[in-house]
Image: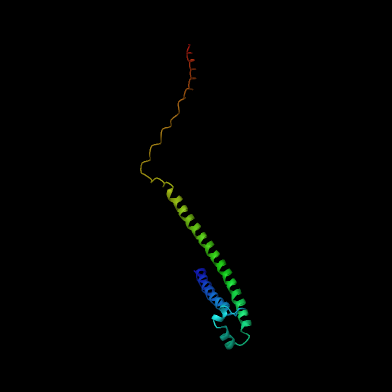
């Protein structure tokens, strides 16, 4: 339960960091004023000062690093959940097999008031050895 909750939390954080990384990358001013101009690169220069590009580069590095770390943590947590589910499945498969062995064994006969007669011992009679088979007669030759 705790493992599942932590996976959801890390996944939510990863989504937020991904969105912020996307925004920071799109806000950066490219050398040819491509997509950065469409999102108001000059407006960010006026609002945050001339050093905006340095801040955006640092933000890109920060969010990129967080993205990689959160991805790694999520992979480790998912692997732990997978191993835990395999262990649970193996335990559930072993438990019915043990109870099945107990139920398939014949129950002891109920005690009765009169004991059953003992089976008569039968001594096998000596079986005579089989007689050797006769050799087949040679087939008559056809003469032409």
Give the left or right position of residue 122, taking residue 9 as reference.
left
User: 124 or 90, which lies in front?
Assistant: 90
- Seen in the picture, residue 119 relative to 129 is either above or below; the reply is below
Q: Going 59% across and 71% down the picture, which residue do you hit?
A: 68
User: 135 or 68, which lies in front?
Assistant: 68
Q: How far across and down, in percent of the image, does residue 80 sit?
A: 55, 64
Q: Going 45% across and 53% down the picture, which residue do you hit?
A: 99
* Colouring mode (rainbow / by chain / secondary structure / one colour): rainbow
User: 19 or 88, which lies in front?
Assistant: 19
Q: Quadrant of residue 35?
A: bottom right
Q: How far across and down, in percent of the image, does residue 79 sit?
A: 55, 64
Farthest left residue? Answer: 113
Q: Going 56% across and 67% down the picture, which residue do you hit?
A: 75
Q: How far across and down, in percent of the image, does residue 84 sit?
A: 52, 62
- Seen in the picture, residue 36 relative to 72 is either above or below; the reply is below
Q: How far across and down, in percent of the image, does residue 20 sit?
A: 55, 77
- Seen in the picture, residue 143 relative to 67 is either above or below; the reply is above
């Amino acid at each position: 339960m705790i493992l599942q909750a932590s996976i959801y939390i890390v996944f939510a954080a990863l989504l937020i960091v991904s969105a912020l990384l996307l925004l920071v990358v799109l806000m950066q001013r490219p050398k040819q004023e491509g997509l950065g101009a469409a999102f108001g690169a000059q407006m960010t220069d006026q609002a945050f000062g001339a050093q905006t590009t340095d801040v955006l580069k640092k933000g890109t590095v920060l969010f990129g690093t967080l993205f990689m770390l959160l991805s790694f943590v999520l992979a480790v947590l998912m692997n732990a959940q997978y191993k835990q589910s395999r262990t649970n499945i193996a335990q559930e498969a072993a438990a019915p097999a043990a109870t099945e062995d107990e139920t398939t064994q014949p129950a002891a006969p109920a005690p009765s008031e009169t004991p059953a007669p003992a089976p008569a011992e039968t001594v096998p009679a000596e079986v005579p050895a089989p007689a050797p088979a006769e050799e087949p007669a040679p087939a008559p030759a056809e003469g032409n």
